Image: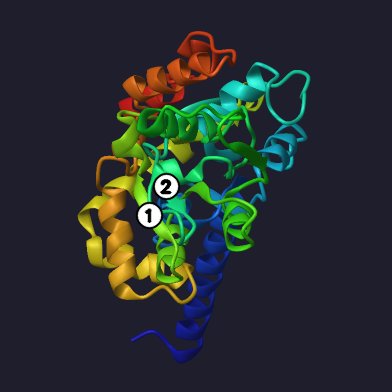
Amino acid sequence: MMPFASRLIASWATACVALVMASTAAIAQVEVRMIGFGGANNLVVWIALDKGLFAKEGLKVTLDRTPGSREQMRNMMEGKYHFATTAFDNIIAYTEGQGRDNLPGFDVVSIMGAHNGFNSVVVAPDIKTYADIRGKALAVDSPKSGYATMMYEIIHRKTGMVQGKDYEILQVGGTGARVKALKEGKAVIAAISSPDDQQLKAAGFRILGDAAIEIGSYQGSTYAVRRSWAKANEATVLALVRATVASTEWLVANRAGTVEVLRARVKGLDEPTANIIYDGLVGPGGMNRRGELNMKGIDTVLALRRQAGNKAAEPAKYIDTSYYAKAMKK
C-alpha cells in the first residue's frame, strides 16, 4: 500500500492537473458577443447557452438585447458585437442604404436562418377587422426595413389599403417599442413576436392573424455577421454554426425541456402560454429547421421590397451560405 504521504502528494498532484486543465479549457474559449431582439426569437440561443452547446464548441457567448435595428446595425459596424439575430429585410435595407442610418462600408450578411416570420398581427382591443385601421397608425421598426414591408402587404391583401395613404406609419423601433405604442394608443396595429403577442392578448388586445400564414413562405429573422470579420475568424463562425444547428435539433426533440428553458428566461410566463409559443416555433412560421436559410422565403422578402418601391438585388448580395455548408461537412 502507498504510504499516506505519497497518497497525499499524488492526490494533490491530480487535483492540480485537473485545475490546470479546467483553467486551460476556460482560457481556450473564444468570446463571442451577440446582439438580438427580445422574446422567444432568442430561444435557440438560450438553449445553446443553457445546455452548454456553445461551450462544447469552445465558445463563450453573451447575448444582449437591442432596442431597434438602427442601434443593432450601428453596433455591428462599430465592432461591439460579432453576430446579430435580425430580420433578413434589415440586412437588405442597410446594404442598399435604406436603413435608418447610412453606414459606409456596410458588409453584414445573413449566414443562417433563425425563423420564418415568427410574428403575430396584433391590434388594439377596439379593432375588429383589418378595415378598422383606416386613418390610424401601424407601428414599425423602420418604414423601409424589418417587418414593415410584410405588414404593408398583409394589410393590402386584406383591404386594398395603401401605407401612408389610407393609414399612417409610426416609426418606433423593435418589438418592445411597438408593444409600447399599442399600449399607449399611438398605433392600433403592429407585427409582434412571442411572448409579447400572447401577453398582449391576455391584456385584451386582439391577434388578427399569423404573419407567416398570411404572407406565405417568408424568411424572417437570420443570424448575421460582417463579411470582413467572418473571413478573419472562420473557425469561430463554423463553431457557432455547429452549435446553433445542434440547438435547433435539441429544441425539436425536447418539448418539455424547451418549455422549461423558455419559462426560466421569460419572467412570469405560464406553462400553457409557453406551450403555445413552442407550437408556433415548430409550426409554419417558426424556426428554420437546422438553421438553413429559406431560399423561397428570401425571394418573397425581395419581391415585397421591390413591390413597396425599395431596392433589392439578387440574394447573393445579402447572404453567404459557404460557412453553413463548410460547418455541416465536418
Q: Position of residue 263 (x, y in %)?
A: 40, 71
Question: Is 318 or 147 nearer to us in this picture?
Answer: 147
> How are the colours assigned in the image?
rainbow
From this viewpoint, is residue 30 visible?
no
User: Which dot marks residue 16?
Assistant: none
Residue tagged 2 = 121
158 sits left or right of 49 in the view? left
Q: Position of residue 15 (x, y in %)?
A: 51, 74
Question: Is 56 or 204 nearer to us in this picture?
Answer: 204
Label 1: few (<14), some (14–19) or many (≥20) C-alpha neighbours in 10 Å: many
191 sits left or right of 108 in the view? left
Residue tagged 1 = 207
Instruction: Label 2: state its secondary structure.
Output: strand
Question: Is 105 or 182 nearer to us in this picture?
Answer: 182
12 sits left or right of 207 in the view? right
Q: Are marks 1 and 2 in contact (CB under 8 Å)?
A: yes
Tell me the quadrant of the picture where the N terminus can be found. Answer: bottom left
Residue at screen point 45% across, 91% down:
4
The three-letter code of the residue at mark 2 reads Val
Instruction: Label 1: state its secondary structure.
Output: strand
Find the residue positioned furthest to the left: 253
